[in-house]
Image (cartoon, grey):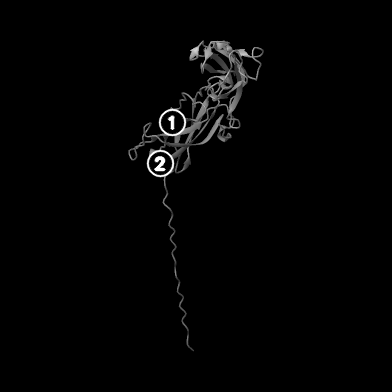
Amino acid sequence: MKTKKIIYIIVSIAILIFADPVSADNNLPYAGEPSSFVISSLQEGQTTPITCTATLTDPDGCEEITGAAAVMFRSNIAGYTNCAANGRNCYRNISCSYNPSFDPCESGVGDLTVGYDCVANVQFYVDPTDAGQYEATDWSCEVTPADGGGPGSPAIFNAEMPSNIALDTDPLEIAYGTIPLGEISATAAVMSVINSGNRSLDIQLSGTDMICPAGTDIPVGNAQYNTFDFEYDVSGLTLTDTLATLTMELPQPSDSTPTVEADTFWELQMLATGVSGSCSGEVVFNALADD
């Protein structure tokens, strides 16, 4: 009887596991001084670019910084990081960009800091903090830097938002039309006053005599005005060469009501004799804060 030899072959399989190389911990960047956040003035009736400049620092080197984001807000807004964006008191998702003039990043030489500008286009009706109901507050700019590891530590910078006490008129001229000698203008001329600033307004008015190409000039006091269609010499207010306040209470504009305006009405009495031609004078409309 033959004996079978059974050979057992044991195969040993070595499994090698290659792990990713271990990198050093990332140090997140942070924002700080020096900085620049100064608001000198606002443009009437349109947006103004406001710049907040900050120094960003990354302990791993300035070249590690990938960008920054900012929020501008009136400083007493609760929960400003989640405030609803609007033209009066909260500007979110402000883009920021590298500013080498403020602080250049010199890569590869151990430079840790870099300058960034964050620019918001601020509405003309933005809440002022130099006067009025928000005088006790400021405007703040929070800048948050980021690198490959994500957002770092923010810094907040403060500035005063200036008042913009301004108005515009539509049309630009008070057209009385043709008035016979000795008569009063048949229909009141209408001049709209528009609040083009960020405060509630009244107005002040003054004028000059109307100069005529031939004959006698028309005295400034022959013009009368009011905030409604009035009867001359009954409820009209006489124009003088000295500023006089007219209460209009034009409120501060907002996102929902960017155009705030009200009408003024004007009538003129022509002299009985000695006037001919097209006469012209000047009326001054001065904006006056009433809050």
Of residues 279 and 288, the one nearer the viewer is 279
Q: Amino acid at mark 1?
A: Thr
Toward which corner of the image does residue 26 lie, by quadrant? top left
**Residue 65 place in picture, x, y as percent:** 42, 40
* 38 over 94 or under it: above or below: above
Q: Nearer the viewer, residue 133 or 233?
A: 233
From the top left corner, tell me how far across and down residue 110 is, in percent.
35, 37
Q: Nearer the viewer, residue 113 or 191?
A: 191
Instruction: Determine the CA span between mark 2 and mark 1.
Output: 19 Å
Q: Residue at x 43, y 31 (%)?
A: 53
User: Judging from the image, what secondary structure is the residue with disc 2 in?
Assistant: helix
Q: Which disc number belongs to residue 255? A: none
Identity of the residue drawn at 38% across and 40% down: 63
> Who is closer to the viewer here, 228 or 243?
228
Residue lying farthest to the left in this orientation: 109
Q: Quadrant of the C terminus?
A: top right
Against 232, is 101 above or below?
Answer: below
Query: Does residue 131 appear left or right of residue 21 in this picture?
Result: right
Residue count near mark 2 (Cα–Cα under 10 Å), binned few <14, some 14–19, many ≥20: many
Task: Please indicate, yes or no, whether residue 96 appears anywhere in the rendered image.
Answer: yes
Q: Which mark is residue 53?
A: 1
Q: Are marks 2 and 1 in contact (CB under 8 Å)?
A: no
Percent x, y for residue 118?
Answer: 46, 34
Circle 1 crowding by C-alpha within 10 Å: few under 14, some 14–19, many from 20? many
Figure disc tally: 2
| Residue annotated with mark 2 | 64
Q: Looking at the picture, which amino acid does disc 2 mark?
A: Glu
Image coords of residue 70 (percent x, y)? 49, 34
Q: Secondary structure at mark 1?
A: strand
* Res 197 seen here: no
**Mark 2 vs mark 1: which is more N-terminal?**
1
Farthest bottom residue? 1
